[in-house]
Image: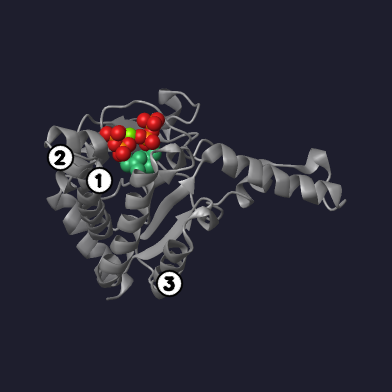
Amino acid sequence: MNAAVDSKVYKENRLKAGLLPDYMPEHVAVIMDGNGRWAKKQGFLTRIKGHEVGVDALRKITTASAELGLNYLTVYAFSTENWNRPKAEVDALMNILMGALEKELPILLANNVKLKAIGNIHALPSKANKKLMSVMDATSGNDGLTLTLALSYGSQEELVHAFRKVAAEVAAGTLKPEEISEDHIERNLFTAGMPNPDLLIRTSGEQRISNYLLWQLAYAEFYFTPVLWPDFDADGFYEAIATFQKRERRFGQTSEQLTAK
Ligand code: IPE
Ligand code: IPE
Ligand code: MG
């Protein structure tokens, strides 16, 4: 499919979803929260079923994003702090991750999705790490949506890592402290090369950032919904984007300045 046909299809899909076709976020970030509460509410004995059904929700949102022609979808799948959960839950999450990578590969390929990861992925069990690498490799030629999994991700850790790299350049004498710019920091983040998210969605009613993309969300619009992640679907996603489309992003300017343009 060539780009022109593609964009016509995307516009039709956006209209069908009740969205303005020409004012779309380029990058949507999601904190997929509420799996454990969902499982409890459904009467399951453990939280694990919530994580399993959470994979189905992620597939729905990924497919919806690809159909709308979004460029980037970045989802918080496992935080550095989540390592502190009971071992049984961490082990189950790693198994679910491996199973999902295996099962979803054909769907990623069919939707022209490129898979990426941010975070300390070396901390993952080696089997999960290998599987992740192989799926990233298998989808590396896709040029549609980039789906980024934040895995063993913590934004403060990411910033420390970036600052260390910049400090090393200063120590080596190749960079002067007064030359350090925002660009230098950005280039050393895991998200280097990606635009910052325009919209952050967090499910489950919590209204906090939980160490996610602290630098990158500087000017994102925030959307919180009480829906628990396993219940989140394409319609909920369209609603979040529709809300985004009604916001005025001023980036520090006045409303009058923007309307004068
Ligand atoms: C989000 O759901 C998934 C991960 C953090 C891995 P939770 O597991 O945090 O579910 P709740 O928030 O306890 O309901
Ligand atoms: C954030 O959710 C991490 C993920 C969704 C992967 P948490 O459930 O871990 O965050 P807190 O503990 O409620 O802040
Ligand atoms: Mg949670």
Question: Would you say 222 lies left or right of 54 here?
Answer: right
The residue located at (52%, 53%) in the rendering is: 123
Q: CA distance from mark 2 to mark 1?
A: 9 Å
Q: CA distance from mark 1 to mark 3?
A: 25 Å
The residue located at (26%, 72%) in the rendering is: 106
The disc labelled 3 sits on which kind of residue?
Ser
In this view, the residue in front, 99 or 77, is: 99
In this view, the residue in front, 222 or 249, is: 222
* Quarter in which the C terminus is drawn: top left
Check whether the beta carbons of the residues at disc 2 and disc 1 lie within 8 A of each other.
yes
Mark 2 residue crowding within 10 angstroms, few (<14) / some (14–19) / many (20+): some
Q: Quadrant of residue 222?
A: top left
Residue where numbered disc 2 is placed: 44
Question: Would you say 220 lies left or right of 23 here?
Answer: right
Q: Quadrant of residue 111?
A: bottom left
The residue located at (45%, 42%) in the rendering is: 83
Position in image of residue 182 (x %, y %): 65, 41
Q: Image height check: is 205 above or below 212?
A: above
The disc labelled 1 sits on which kind of residue?
Ile
Q: Nearer the viewer, mark 2 or mark 3?
A: 2
How many numbered marks are there? 3
Residue where numbered disc 3 is placed: 134
In this view, the residue in front, 46 or 76, is: 46
Quarter, ligand 1:
top left
Question: Which numbered dot is residue 226?
Answer: none
Mark 3 residue crowding within 10 angstroms, few (<14) / some (14–19) / many (20+): some
